[in-house]
Amino acid sequence: MTKYEVDKKDFKKLERKLNKIEINLIQDLTKELGVTASIISLKAKRDAPYDTGFLKDSINFGKDSNGVYVESPAEYSGFQEYGTKYMKAQPFFFDNAKTEIKILIQRLKNKIKRLV
């Protein structure tokens, strides 16, 4: 029979390291979410149809108590994104968001692999 003994100091050391990893992950996640929101906003502005510039100017991102957000609050944003029966769609928002979220997930997976 094999017997393993673990010193109480080893548990404390492991606990400190795990806490450090958790803090690093939270800091990295917060940073990565902000970077991703910024990139989505920039790409949506780049791809938004231009007439008066109001749509491009309305696209923004920020941070609130729920996390980060990217928004296009112009009332006609949805019509531009999805089109209507009289106007073809001119997607500028969600395709960029989907692409950048996939990239975010890959970056986070890589960070976790490096930490573990």
Image (cartoon, rainbow, N blue to C red):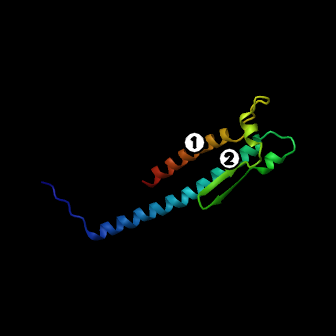
Crowding at dot 1, Cα within 10 Å, few <14 / some 14-19 / many 20+, comes out as few
Q: Which residue in the structure is indicated by mark 2?
A: 40
Q: Position of residue 80 (x, y in %)?
A: 76, 37
- 65 sits to left or right of 26: right
Q: Position of residue 42 (x, y in %)?
A: 73, 48
- Write the residue at 60% across / 53% down: 33
Query: Looking at numbered disc 1 in the image, what kind of residue is underneath it?
Result: Lys
- Write the residue at 31% across / 66% down: 11
Q: Position of residue 68 (x, y in %)?
A: 62, 55
86 over 59 or under it: above or below: above
Q: Which residue in the structure is indicated by mark 1?
A: 102
Query: Looking at numbered disc 2 in the image, what kind of residue is underneath it?
Result: Ile
90 over 112 or under it: above or below: above
Taking depth in this image into account, of 14 and 64 the one nearest to the observer is 64
The extreme front residue here reads 85
Taking depth in this image into account, of 87 and 64 the one nearest to the observer is 87
Crowding at dot 2, Cα within 10 Å, few <14 / some 14-19 / many 20+, comes out as many
76 over 111 or under it: above or below: above
Circle nearer the N terminus (1, 2)? 2
Q: Position of residue 94 (x, y in %)?
A: 66, 40
Q: How many marks?
A: 2
Residue 102, quarter of the rendered image: top right
Mark 1 vs 2: CB contact within 8 A: no
- Disc 2 is placed on an element classified as helix
- 1 sits to left or right of 45: left
The extreme right residue here reads 52
